Image (tube, rainbow, N blue to C red):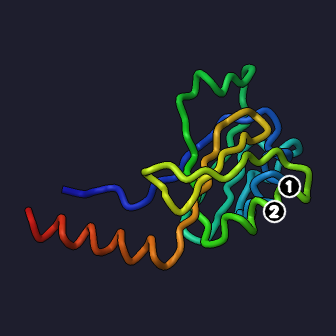
Amino acid sequence: MAKVAHSTPMLHVAEIERSILFYETLGFRLIDDDGCKPIGWARMHCASGDIMFLRAETEIDAKKQGFLFSLYTPDLAGLREGLVAKGMPALEIKHPPYMPSGTMGLADPDGYHIEISHWGETEQVNWEKHLKERLESQ
């Protein structure tokens, strides 16, 4: 049976141009749009994933979207410093049991919650080990 190969989250946003500027600050780059003024849809890309924006036809209520955007960085403290320097309201870094190396949250211009976690070499090695052990136990 055929299977899907890629997943691209799509967000309804009020102003795509504003969302592009916000996500560029996080490290995404614009790779495609519809070429219209104002932009009706746009796709952005980061090192291992995409996000796509669709211009909303109605008012955005991020709480009704039930959406959590999870991003990872090898330098969480450095990213937070850069966001704060640009006046972005990044929350304090926390160290919950599910992400002991650190995580922080912030909201995008439409109110969508973004969780950004540290993901360095240690986390990658531990995750690969966990996956290998899990596969071997099945």
Residue 41 is left or right of residue 95, and the answer is right
* Badge 2 amino acid: Glu
Callout 1, which amino acid? Val
In percent of width and height, residue 65 lies at 57, 27
Q: Residue at coordinates 71% horizontally, 51% vertically from top-left? A: 42
Q: Residue at x 64, y 38 (%)?
A: 113
Residue 23, image x and y in percent? 75, 54
Question: What is the quadrant of residue 79 in the picture?
Answer: bottom right
Tell me if 7 is positioned left or right of 71 in this view.
left
**Which mark, residue 58?**
none
At x 55%, y 53%, the residue is: 95
Disc 1 and disc 2: Cα gap in Å? 5 Å
Q: Residue furthest left?
A: 138
Q: Quadrant of the N terminus?
A: bottom left
Report crowding for label 1: few under 14, some 14 to 19, many 20 or more residues within 10 A (C-alpha).
few
Q: In this rendering, would 6 be left or right of 88? A: left
| Residue at 11% across, 71% down | 136
- Quickly name the residue at label 2: 81
Q: On the rendered image, what quadrant is the C terminus found in?
A: bottom left
Q: Secondary structure at mark 1?
A: helix
The residue carrying mark 1 is: 84
* Local SS, label 2: helix
**Residue 122's spot in the image, x, y percent?**
45, 76
Report if the CB atoms under discs 1 and 2 are less than 8 Å apart.
Answer: yes
Instruction: Identify which residue, 121 or 24, lies in the foreground.
Output: 121
Establish if 74 lies above or below 12.
Answer: below
Task: State the image coordinates of residue 83 (x, y, percent, origin top left).
Answer: 82, 57
Q: Nearer the viewer, residue 20 or 103?
A: 103
Mark 2 surroundings within 10 Å by alpha-carbon count, few (fewer than 14), some (14 through 19), many (20 or more): few
**Residue 31 figure quarter:** bottom right
For this view, does 121 lie left or right of residue 4?
right
